[in-house]
Image: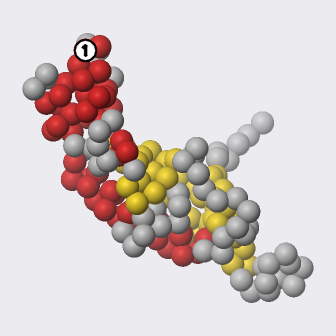
Amino acid sequence: MSSNGFTTCLWFDGNAEAAADFYVSVFKDGRIGRIGRYNEAGPGKDGEVMVVEFEINGQKFIGLNGGPQFPFTEAVSFQIRCTDDAEADYYHEALTRDGGQEANCGWVKDKFGLSWQVTPEEAIELISDPDPARAVRATAAMMQMKKLDVAAMRRAADGA
């Protein structure tokens, strides 16, 4: 049996194309693919966008304009592993602008309600430190943060 991989389908309430455009603008390697429109067969209005295919960071997505029945929740999020604080700052700012909001531990919710974990790689290393005491101190510091501050996490891990 062959597989063409996975495509994540995201359910939107009429703004799938705007969301795809936004994500492609945030993730510089993104691109928009096919756009399918409702036709006279329905269930949406003839000519309106039904689905939009897009790709970011090598991951394929379909934005489906399905209606208001199923809003996003924090039960599903996408983690962005960042190489450093500058990259994390970029994604944190880009995803929270124009109505997005920050949450605890590096999580943000974009203006469409989709949750993202903006995570510098070193933050993962610090909370996974082989020395349990260092990991506890780094994790405790992280739990007090919205945007992750790796330098502060490192100081906490070191006991400073």
Q: Quadrant of the C terminus?
A: top left
Q: Quadrant of residue 159?
A: top left
Q: Determine if residue 125 is in view.
A: no
Give the residue at mark 1. Answer: 133
**At x 53% / y 52%, what residue is drawn?**
59
Is residue 153 something one can see in this rendering?
Answer: yes
Is 29 or 154 nearer to us in this picture? 154
Q: Position of residue 137 (x, y in %)?
A: 24, 23
> How dense is the environment of label 1, judged by Cα within 10 Å: few (below 14), some, or many (20 and up)?
some
Where residue 149 sits, quadrant-wise, is top left
Expressed as whole percent of the image width and height from the top left, the position of residue 44 reads 80, 78
Task: State which quarter of the image contains the N terminus.
Answer: top right
Residue for point 60% across, 56% down: 72
Q: Residue furthest front?
A: 144
Between 38 and 74, the one lying in front of the other is 74
Left or right, 95 with respect to 6, comes to left
The percent coordinates of residue 24 (x first, y second) are 45, 67
Would residue 128 be found to the left or right of residue 23 on screen? left
Secondary structure at badge 1 equals: helix
Kindly identify the amino acid type of the residue bearing the numbered disc 1.
Ala
Which residue is drawn at the image coordinates 50% and 73% (left, top)? 21
